[in-house]
């Protein structure tokens, strides 16, 4: 019974490694506004995000003006000016403000019971951007529209299922990792041969981490393939990689740790066998047969 119960607990602990890692990441990394903003902040200096913002702002300016046959020259000039602005501290502050507002809006909607769409008003960010571009003498910047602009982040019919899943992750993010560790420890303590139990637990943890890494990579491909055509794939990929950076680091750490512990347990088991074999008493010699007397 000890062997069966120990094996059952160890297998269950290893199966829970991927969902436990994902739930902890969702709760403590994605569910925290401060950490989310800190994660997204470096993207403001990335070429992909700066390029996407430059194209969007340039298109917005050019849609408000009529320049006739000089449109290509004016567009190129405006684009260079906006691109230069994306390298300033003012742009990084605007980027952080937009991300903080978006994250708080989404969290408020996921923790609320209201059945309504989740929207984000970009007017404050557009106002800051317009003021800064105007102060930097960017041509036609004063024509950027600053009216209330609501962007739908989540539709009403999508918010309900996501709300239930988010609440589950918030609870599981704390208890599921603890349960996984407790099951593994109990399985090892109940085992008749604990070194083998440690080896099995370590290998199972490494396998679970590998599955989580594959799921993260598959999620990236599915996310990018499901985006609308007008969304830049490079910028979206940079955002996905930034958000899952901690998850991928933890995954590879668990994988390396599991393999290392399994190898160490295997080596110590072999050494213990050799010591036991060398310490065993030598077998007594068999007595010689007596010769018959003449």
Image (tube, rainbow, N blue to C red):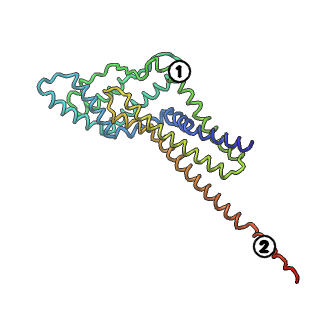
Q: Nearer the viewer, mark 2 or mark 1?
A: 2
Which residue is tagged 2? 285
Name the residue located 52 percent from the left edge and 23 percent from the top edge: 163
Q: Residue furthest bottom?
A: 294
Please give the name of the residue rendered at 51% of the width and 43% of the height, measured from the top-left corner.
210
Q: Which mark is residue 238?
A: none
Quarter of the image with the C terminus is bottom right
- In which quarter of the view is residue 291 placed? bottom right
Q: Is residue 90 visible?
A: no
Q: Residue at x 44, y 38 (%)?
A: 217
Q: Mark 2, residues whose alpha carbon is within 10 Å: few (<14), some, or many (≥20)?
A: few
**Where is 180 relative to 169, above or below?**
below
**Residue 288 appearing in the image:** yes
Question: Where in the figure is residue 161, as x and y percent of width and height?
Answer: 51, 21
Asked where in the image residue 57 lies, by quadrant, the reply is top left
Q: Which residue has dot 1 on it?
A: 112
């Amino acid at each position: 019974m000890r062997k069966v119960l120990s094996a059952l607990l160890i297998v269950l602990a290893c199966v829970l490694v991927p969902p436990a890692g994902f739930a902890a990441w969702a709760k403590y990394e994605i569910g925290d506004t401060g950490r989310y903003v800190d994660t997204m902040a470096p993207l403001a200096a990335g070429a992909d995000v700066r390029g996407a913002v430059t194209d969007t702002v340039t298109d917005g300016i050019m849609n408000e003006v009529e320049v006739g046959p000089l449109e290509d020259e004016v567009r190129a000039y405006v684009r260079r000016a906006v691109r230069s602005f994306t390298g300033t501290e003012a742009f990084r502050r605007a980027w952080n403000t937009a991300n903080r507002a978006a994250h708080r809006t989404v969290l408020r909607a996921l923790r609320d019971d209201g059945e309504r769409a989740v929207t984000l008003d970009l007017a404050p960010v557009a106002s800051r951007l317009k003021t800064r571009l105007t102060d930097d003498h960017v041509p036609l910047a004063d024509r950027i529209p600053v009216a209330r602009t609501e962007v739908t982040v989540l539709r009403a019919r999508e918010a309900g299922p996501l709300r239930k899943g988010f609440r589950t992750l918030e609870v599981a993010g704390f208890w599921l990792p603890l349960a996984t560790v407790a099951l593994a420890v109990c399985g090892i303590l109940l085992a008749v041969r604990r070194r083998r139990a440690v080896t099995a637990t370590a290998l199972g943890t490494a396998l679970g981490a590998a599955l989580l890494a594959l799921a993260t990579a598959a999620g990236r491909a599915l996310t990018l393939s499901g985006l609308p055509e007008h969304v830049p794939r490079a910028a979206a990929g940079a955002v996905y990689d930034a958000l899952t950076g901690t998850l991928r680091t933890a995954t590879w750490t668990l994988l390396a740790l599991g393999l290392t512990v399994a190898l160490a347990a295997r080596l110590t088991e072999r050494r213990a066998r050799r010591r036991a074999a060398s310490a065993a008493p030598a077998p007594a010699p068999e007595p010689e047969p007596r010769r018959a007397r003449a």
